[in-house]
Image (cartoon, rainbow, N blue to C red):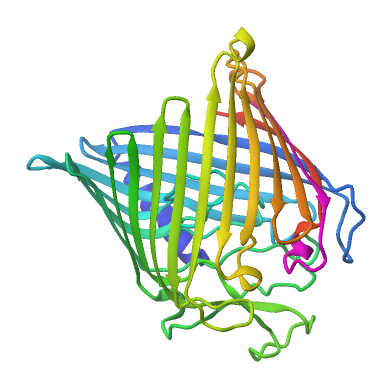
């Protein structure tokens, strides 16, 4: 988002805070480091990086039914200037009330919205833009300017969104790890003549029928997932003639997500149909994406207080090898072990496999509270095999080991 818009949001929230009846200030301060065992593939890359992340939240009640929330983020990275960045994750007013037998809620400003039921990837989740310099798998999101109206009742929940500004996706810079062989320019091209100011619209209806929870979604506007154009074709003259520039099309997407709960078993599904997007060849192609998942929890594992959750998900994109997404035909199998101890220790292990290419990756994560305010996270993504025939090979060949120490206040 442009700096002027972020500053305006901060000033707006500060002015509201002056009139707030109650204020609450909280947040996280994290020191992070990563080690990459593979030798750097490109000049300027390092085997180790360190950084600092600050993400505070200011919440204030203006009236009995009105509040505001402000959550900025700043990251410093020792190696990649593109990863050093600031963003306003949330900066919105919340108003709510009753409307007959129904309830309503209105959010105005920048916010983050999540749609979907799957763990690894959510094709229905399209409102916010991804912040890929933050993490390759955690799917952190940039704050999205929106008018978000929710009406709920016994008949379900209906949400409508007016999205007046498009956020560009972030990508690693020249010295960043987890980047491709071709640099991505920090600029963008748009199909719409309004460019990033095109007004997008979205809607969601959700409800439950007994054991089944479901959602129906629709989106019309600027694609969040770009197609890439060689910079020389777009008229740019960068230092690297092989660099790419993101191109954002106008699309229509309709989706459904559902979760069926039967005791300790969860059945999950997400499916979308998208029109107007381009494939890797640059041709417009309507396509369907699908995620099917199964989740089973074993409580009191071996008579202990620990719970083990086993998960499997299949991700499919019917464009096949011409898909712009890395999730074209992949299988993910994982286990989540919650020790249910005072420290809140959690251990996650999973393996991701591409069913079309010889790509396998092991994911490991350990989270634990060290005290009331401090917590630790260890993480490893280990690429067991990579396939040069895979068009996503360049971004998938870096394994890494990361450690985070977070102070929560």
The answer to which quarter of the image holds residue 261 is: top left
Please tell me which residue is depicted at 46% across the width and 34% down the height of the picture. 266
Residue range corresponding to the magenta coloring: 375-395
Q: Which of 274 and 312 is in front in this view?
A: 312
Q: In the image, is 13 to the left or to the right of 368?
A: left
Single out the residue that lies furthest toward the left.
100
Q: Where is residue 273 in the image (x, y as percent from the top left)?
A: 43, 66
Which quadrant of the view contains residue 192? bottom left
* Residue 160 seen: yes
Q: Residue furthest right?
A: 39
Residue 69 in picture, x, y percent from top left? 39, 43
Nearest the camera: 382 or 269?
A: 269
For the C terminus, which image quadrant? top right
Residue 363 covered by magenta stretch: no
Q: Is residue 120 visible?
A: no
Relative to 252, residue 292 above or below: above
Residue for point 74% across, 72% down: 183
Q: Residue at x 86, y 59 (%)?
A: 45
The residue lying at 57 percent from left, 13 percent from top is 300
Q: Where is residue 296 drawn, in percent x and y?
A: 53, 30
Quick check: 302 above or below 165?
above
């Amino acid at each position: 988002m442009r700096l002027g818009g972020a500053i305006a949001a901060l000033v707006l929230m500060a002015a509201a805070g002056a009139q707030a009846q109650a204020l609450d200030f909280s947040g996280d301060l994290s020191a992070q480091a990563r080690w990459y065992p593979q030798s750097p593939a490109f000049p300027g890359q390092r085997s180790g990086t360190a950084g600092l992340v600050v993400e505070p939240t200011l919440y204030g009640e203006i009236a009995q039914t009105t509040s505001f929330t402000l959550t900025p983020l700043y990251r410093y990275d020792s190696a990649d200037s593109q990863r050093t960045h600031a963003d306003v994750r949330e900066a919105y007013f919340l108003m709510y009330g009753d409307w007959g037998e129904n309830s309503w809620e209105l959010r105005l400003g920048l916010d983050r919205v999540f749609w979907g039921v799957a763990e690894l990837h959510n094709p229905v989740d399209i409102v916010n833009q991804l912040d890929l310099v933050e993490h390759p798998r955690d799917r952190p999101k940039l704050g999205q300017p929106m008018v978000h109206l929710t009406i709920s009742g016994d008949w379900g929940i209906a949400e409508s969104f007016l999205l007046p500004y498009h956020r560009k996706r972030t990508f690693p810079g020249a010295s960043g790890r987890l980047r491709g062989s071709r640099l991505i320019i920090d600029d963008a091209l748009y199909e719409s003549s309004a460019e990033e100011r095109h007004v997008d619209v979205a809607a969601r209806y959700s409800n439950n029928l007994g054991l089944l929870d479901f959602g129906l979604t629709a989106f019309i506007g600027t694609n969040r997932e770009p197609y890439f154009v060689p910079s020389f074709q777009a008229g740019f003259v960068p230092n690297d003639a092989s660099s790419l520039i993101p191109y954002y099309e106008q699309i229509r997407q309709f989706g459904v997500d559902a979760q069926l709960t039967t005791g300790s078993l969860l059945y999950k599904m997400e499916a979308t149909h998208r029109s107007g997007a381009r494939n890797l060849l640059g041709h417009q192609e309507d396509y369907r994406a699908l995620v099917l998942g199964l989740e089973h929890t074993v409580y009191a594992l071996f008579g202990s207080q620990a719970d083990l959750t086993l998960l499997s998900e299949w991700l499919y994109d019917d464009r096949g090898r011409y898909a712009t997404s890395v999730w074209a035909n992949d299988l993910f199998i994982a286990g989540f072990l919650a020790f249910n101890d005072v420290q809140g220790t959690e251990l996650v292990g999973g393996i991701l496999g591409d069913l079309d290419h010889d790509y396998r990756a092991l994911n490991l994560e350990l989270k634990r509270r060290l005290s009331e305010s401090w917590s630790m996270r260890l993480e490893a993504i280990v690429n067991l095999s990579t396939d040069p025939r895979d068009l996503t090979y360049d971004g998938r060949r870096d394994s890494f080991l990361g450690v985070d120490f977070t102070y929560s206040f």
